Amino acid sequence: MSEPVISLRGVRAELGSRTVLRGIDLTVHRGEVVALLGANGSGKSTAVRTVIGQVPVSDGEIELFGTPRRRFRDWRRLGYVPQRTTAAGGVPATVTEIVASGRLSRTRLGILRRTDHAAIRRALDLVGMADRAKDSVNALSGGQHQRVLIARALACEPELLIMDEPMAGVDLVSQEVLAATLREQVARGTTVLLVLHELGPLEPLIDRAVVLRDGCVTHDGPPPKAVGQHALPGHDHVHPHAAPGTDPVRTGLLS
């Protein structure tokens, strides 16, 4: 096996008074594509949010690229796509402005250079949004918002890409675009950790599936056939009736 990019050992986490992760172990090696699967409330989204520091852990250890997460500072090596939300959170902005924000970790004093602009254009091309570069994100469909969020993560040219339900609630055309985008990233050697409620068009890319149930790992290995064909009951994603721009953390729709 290649070196671990993500390592969780005995990680426990709580949201309020509820224990969500109960001592889970998870390792993602360089170049792997790992899917986190499980029913609503199983802890999938919480697990990835502990990795990026959004949720504190009450016990256990987390390492990124061999460095304890509490000391990790090189965040430009990591791209993160949150659960589906509006790309600008209700703030007026163009598609290019949102994608450019993902490049800031590689700039000096926030000044974009020629290489930065080239990376932004490549990211827009990858997700099929180059023709909407100057448009307001408020004019986009839900699937297009998701493409913009993925382009923002890709703009920093990450070694590790973490995506939380990238296919949830998006149209078929956008699903196909996102699957093609991910295939290209995998071909480049990007390490990928995905939260999914079903494998769908991403199934051929998945090296390992880790299934969570009630905050515990119940499977770590080849993707279970049943999971690959059907959505798990009560899967984690933003509720289809949530208002545009709803914060899934504050509303409790994120598990």
Image (cartoon, grey):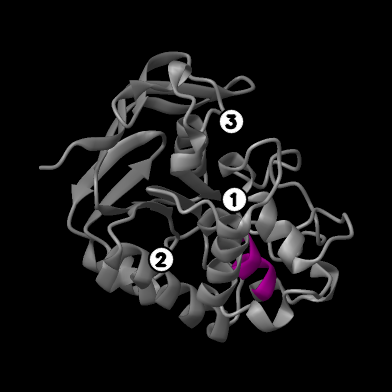
Q: Answer with the quarter of the image where residue 133 lies.
A: bottom right
Q: Answer with the quarter of the image where residue 186 lies.
A: bottom left
Given this view, does label 1 or label 2 mark the residue nearer the observer? 1
- 2 and 3 marks in contact (CB < 8 Å): no
**Residue, disc 3:** 54
Q: Is residue 44 above or below residue 135?
A: above
**Left or right, 255 with reference to 163:** right
Given this view, does label 2 or label 3 mark the residue nearer the observer? 3
The local secondary structure at tag 3 comes to loop
Q: Nearer the viewer, residue 56 or 231?
A: 56
- 1 and 2 marks in contact (CB < 8 Å): no
Whether residue 185 is visible here, answered yes or no, is: yes
- Which is nearer the N-term, disc 2 or disc 3? 3
Q: Is residue 214 above or below residue 132?
A: above
Q: Nearer the viewer, residue 62 or 123?
A: 123
Residue sitting at x 36%, y 71%: 184
Residue at mark 1 to residue at mark 2: CA–CA distance: 17 Å
Amino acid type, label 1 = Pro
